[in-house]
Image (cartoon, rainbow, N blue to C red):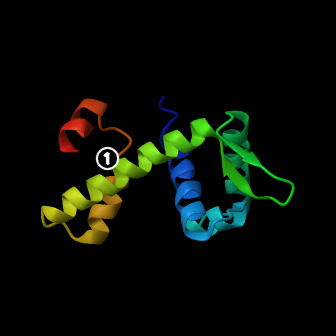
Amino acid sequence: MRVGESKENYLEAVYVLSKRNGFVRSIDVANYFEYSKPSVSVAMANLRAAKLITVDDAGGIHLTDVGRALAEQVYERHTLLTRFLTALGVDPEIAQEDACRIEHVLSQSSFDKLR
């Protein structure tokens, strides 16, 4: 299930932040991307409406089972592509940026071959 690049990026950010910090709030996502809090609030509302996240009473963001599966898929693509590009000699910062763009358009078949 693909949900679009923007949603995938937000899901990946929530996943990464939850692994790093154990607790994720909208402000954490805003800081992660250097986006405004209102922009992130709109995105979180969209993810909540798509049943990809839940938000608890304290403002904590949690991935649903479907949201987690999607986030893990995007994160795996991102990390593998970054490692692959870096191994080819691409500067790590550029590899990271390129992987972020490629992860959304690469077919599953091509990704499976890279893996």
Query: Total of numbered circles in the picture?
Result: 1
Q: Position of residue 7 (x, y in %)?
A: 56, 43
What's the residue type where badge 1 is placed? Ile
Q: Which residue is pictured at 55% across the width and 63% down the height?
A: 19
> How far from the left and from the top, in percent, is residue 24?
67, 62
Residue 79 appears at what percent x and percent y?
34, 57
- Location of residue 113 (image quadrant): top left
Closer to the camera in the image, 115 or 11? 115
Point out the image quarter for the C terminus: top left
Quarter-of-image position of residue 99: bottom left
Depth check: 75 or 49 in front? 75
* Front-most of residues 99 and 74: 74
For image coordinates 70% across by 66% down, the residue present is 27
Identify which residue, 67 or 50, lies in the foreground.
Answer: 67
Residue where numbered disc 1 is placed: 102
The residue lying at 26 percent from left, 39 percent from top is 111
